[in-house]
Amino acid sequence: MYANPVAYVFSCIFVLIAHIAMLLNVYFNGNYTEVRDVAVLGAAVLILDISYFIVILLFKQTSYVLDFLLILVLNMSFIFQSCFGKVGFDVKHLITCIVCLASCKAGYILCRNHKLLQDKKPYIYGGVIFVMLIVFVFTSPEDMWIRIGSFAIQPSEFAKPLFILACATSIADQQKKHKILTFSVVYENLALLALTAIVCLIQVKSHDYGSLPTFLSIFAAGFLLRICYPKAKFSKKKLIGVIALVIVFVLIGLKYAPEYVQHRLHVDIWSDKTGDGYQQSQALIAIAKGGWFGVGPGKGFLSNVFAFENDIVFATISEEWGLIYALMAIFAILVMTSVPLVNPARSYYHGTISACVCAALIVQMALNIFGSCNLIPFTGVTIPFISAGGSSLMVSGFMVGMLMAAQSPSFKEPKHKKKEADVPTWRWQE
Amino acid sequence: MESLDTILCIAAAAALDVCIFVLLLTAYRERRSSKKTWHELSHDMVLTEQNVTYELGCDEVLIGRHASADIRLPDLSVSRYHAMLTVSNGIWTIHDMGSKSGLFVNGSMVREAVLHENDLITLGNRRLIFRKRRSERVR
């Protein structure tokens, strides 16, 4: 039984209020031809909210706050996506949101028992290599998608949760040290380094420079927690060494990057507004046009620009809903990643999973937003939960499921209680 | 009319703000209940040493002299990472982590041992008792 029924009821009510306030904004400010469009959208949002509030009660969790945050952000995303250009009903995005919620629960169930996951570590490594092989064989720099009928999936997205599980570790695993020359080495750390090298090489080969920083951030979070365990009290020498190494690698990477990457790094979007700088210049104009409170749902011009619903979604939201609202949506996702700080995981394994998931989500958001604002080159990475895209939403949902598992872990009771040992002959003298 | 639009935008943003604030409060409330659940799962065990009580707050608790150990025993007879307590299926187990002075449970040297209530754990010159948490005394 959930220990905080009052908090549950209040959370449900306030999530509903937040969505109703958005729908009222659509009704009064939106660009629609018939009121029925808004009514259908509103009904879909509220039905999804209430259904999810009921469904989560079937999962006996200690913590539901991530569920509330997830449904809050997902339905916000559904309203945003339905209103871009003109208020309507984005069935495809609604289905992907439902898939995201389902994969979240799948992630929660699969990652709840960390002892089980630790035993299956070799299979997890195998899984990452298998997905990377699919990326290597079936995708190319021109097309990173695999098309099956009307569906298209991005296989490199599915490697992310598996890679997170590969990076997760426990203190006991880190104690399995072996002497090589004068160094104490944990074999699993070497295996992880090799796996990361494989992943990075395939990403570079596929020219997927958007996913590469996400994988590197997952690895960085996992590796730092491995070398600076326990309690994440970072060893200053190791930390400085790792940061110096990262800077050296980044500088070498930038120096010897391929020509088209160099071009992207140095492109001046304002002198090439109709060419390579088209999307970013339009995105910046749209953010400026939207101002603090936006032009109104469905009244923006950015919906005519390519990839408005995923690559430059931050700018599209800023234009139609205002910069304040776009920042609030991002803040909601940041709160989601800060939940493990409020309620820390009870196992080191889940702690490392949480750190890796948060690193991945934050880096993806940063790449998208900074790319839209022309602070870094355009990468085409999606904002988790907000951007359209089945693969991205499904994987993001699974990753939030991992965070939920860390909040409500399983510590199973023994089936047969062990016989109590005899009372020792001595007693502690107080 | 334009001012009404702005007011509606502000109202929507404020509703989202309040909702996030309420969810943060929920997270803090859940923190308390998850702590209680953990105490039940770990059978509310603690390690004590004379007047000091060490909490067993997670499923792997490292004991040693090193500053980053969960339970720090600043004594030269204790290794930097001396022993580790783990809980699995509600049973606490202690493992020696290659310490120099060894790990003793109830006077017997062990590499690994299942712990029971009131077991005496000796690490170097330090002696710890594994026992249930005591409720506050009523005066």
Image (spheres, coloured by chain):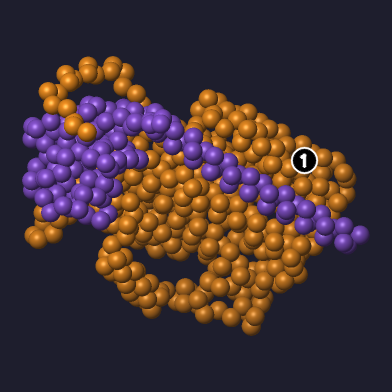
Closer to the camera, A332 or A91? A332
Q: Residue at x 70, y 37 (%)?
A: A13
Q: Residue at x 71, y 33 (%)?
A: A47
Q: In the rendered view, would you say A299 is above or below A406?
A: below
The colour with which the image depicts chain A is orange
Q: Residue A354, image x and y in percent?
A: 43, 48
Chain ID for label 1?
Answer: A
Q: Seen in the image, is A390 located left or right of residue A291?
A: left
Residue under label 1:
A42
Q: In the rendered view, would you say A230 is above or below A123?
A: below
Kindly state the secondary structure of the residue where label 1 is placed: helix
Q: Residue at x 64, y 83 (%)?
A: A271
The colour with which the image depicts chain B is purple
Q: Residue A306, image x and y in percent?
A: 66, 62
- Please tell me how many numbered marks the rendered image carries: 1
Q: Residue A131, image x and y in percent?
A: 39, 47
Indicate the amino acid at tag 1: Gly
Q: Residue at x 16, y 19 (%)?
A: A422
Q: Quadrant for residue B56, please give it.
A: top left
Q: Is residue B51 among the parts visible in the rendering?
A: yes
Quadrant showing the C terminus of chain A: top left
Q: Outermost residue, right direction?
A: B1
Q: Is residue A147 among the parts visible in the rendering?
A: no
Q: Outermost residue, front direction?
A: B139
Q: Quadrant for residue A65, please give it.
A: top right
Closer to the camera, A282 or A143? A282
Q: Seen in the image, is A298 located left or right of residue A317?
A: right
Q: Residues within 10 Å of mark 1 (few under 14, many from 20)?
A: many
Q: Seen in the image, is A131 located left or right of residue A2?
A: left
Q: Quadrant for residue A292, please give it.
A: bottom right
Q: Residue A71, image x and y in percent?
A: 62, 41
Closer to the camera, B33 or A89? B33
